[in-house]
């Protein structure tokens, strides 16, 4: 049986590198995507189990990618965990509005990754 795929959209190297390592430790294959405009195309092609999205430094592009996932019948079902720093309330709200399954603080994502994954996958 192949390992589940997590598609990860990010620009910042931290916490991305740590998060990729942690996902791999949990048995996920991870594919990184730097351009959120290609999120739907990549998700349709690769069939990930879930999407993780770093909202920083440009939440508008990432939120547009999340909204495009939700609008596409082939990807609307995918759970999306979006994260940003605690000081980025507007980015958190924009991700919720775009349809992210969970929106969390980037300081908490590494510590509580197992719980966030379980929660996101349970919802969908």
Image (cartoon, rainbow, N blue to C red):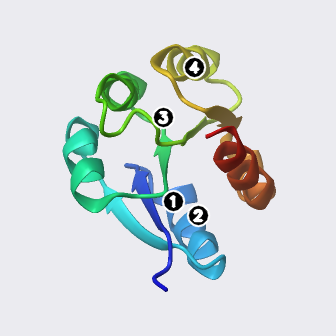
Gap between marks 1 and 2, in whole Å? 5 Å
Viewer can see residue 92 = yes
Q: Disc 3, disc 1: CB below 8 Å?
A: no
Q: Disc 2, disc 4: CB below 8 Å?
A: no
Could you classify mark 4 by the number of other residues whose Cα lies within 10 Å: few (under 14), some (14-19), or many (20 or more)?
some
Q: Give whichever of discs 2 and 4 has the lower sequence position.
A: 2
In the rendered picture of this protein, how many numbered marks are placed on residues? 4
Q: Which-is-in-front pick, marks 2 and 4?
A: 4
Q: Give whichever of discs 4 and 3 has the lower sequence position.
A: 3
107 vs 25, left or right, is right
Gap between marks 1 and 4, in whole Å? 21 Å
Q: Position of residue 17 (x, y in %)?
A: 51, 67
94 vs 104, left or right, is left
Gap between marks 4 and 3, in whole Å? 11 Å
Gap between marks 2 and 3, in whole Å? 14 Å
Q: Disc 1, disc 2: CB below 8 Å?
A: yes
Q: Disc 4, disc 3: CB below 8 Å?
A: no
Q: Residue at x 41, y 57 (%)?
A: 7
Viewer can see residue 34 = no
Could you classify mark 1 by the number of other residues whose Cα lies within 10 Å: few (under 14), some (14-19), or many (20 or more)?
many
Residue 117: image quadrant is bottom right
Q: Give whichever of discs 2 and 3 has the lower sequence position.
A: 2
Query: Which of the pair 37/117 is nearer the observer?
Result: 117
Residue beneath disc 2: 19
Q: Specify the label residue 96 is tagged with.
A: 4
Residue beneath disc 3: 55
Could you classify mark 2 by the number of other residues whose Cα lies within 10 Å: few (under 14), some (14-19), or many (20 or more)?
some
Could you classify mark 3 by the number of other residues whose Cα lies within 10 Å: few (under 14), some (14-19), or many (20 or more)?
many
Residue beneath disc 1: 16
The vertical placement of 96 against 36, above or below, is above
């Amino acid at each position: 049986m192949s390992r589940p795929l997590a598609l990860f959209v990010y620009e910042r190297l931290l916490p991305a590198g740590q998060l990729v390592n942690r996902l791999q430790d949990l048995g996920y294959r991870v594919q990184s995507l730097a351009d959120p405009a290609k999120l739907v195309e990549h998700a349709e092609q690769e069939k990930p189990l879930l999407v993780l999205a770093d909202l920083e430094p440009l939440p508008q592009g990432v939120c547009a990618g999340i909204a495009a996932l939700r609008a596409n019948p082939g990807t609307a079902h995918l759970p999306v965990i979006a994260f940003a720093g605690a000081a980025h309330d507007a980015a958190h709200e924009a991700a919720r509005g775009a349809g992210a399954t969970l929106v969390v603080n980037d300081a908490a994502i590494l510590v509580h990754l197992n719980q966030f994954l379980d929660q996101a996958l349970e919802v969908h």
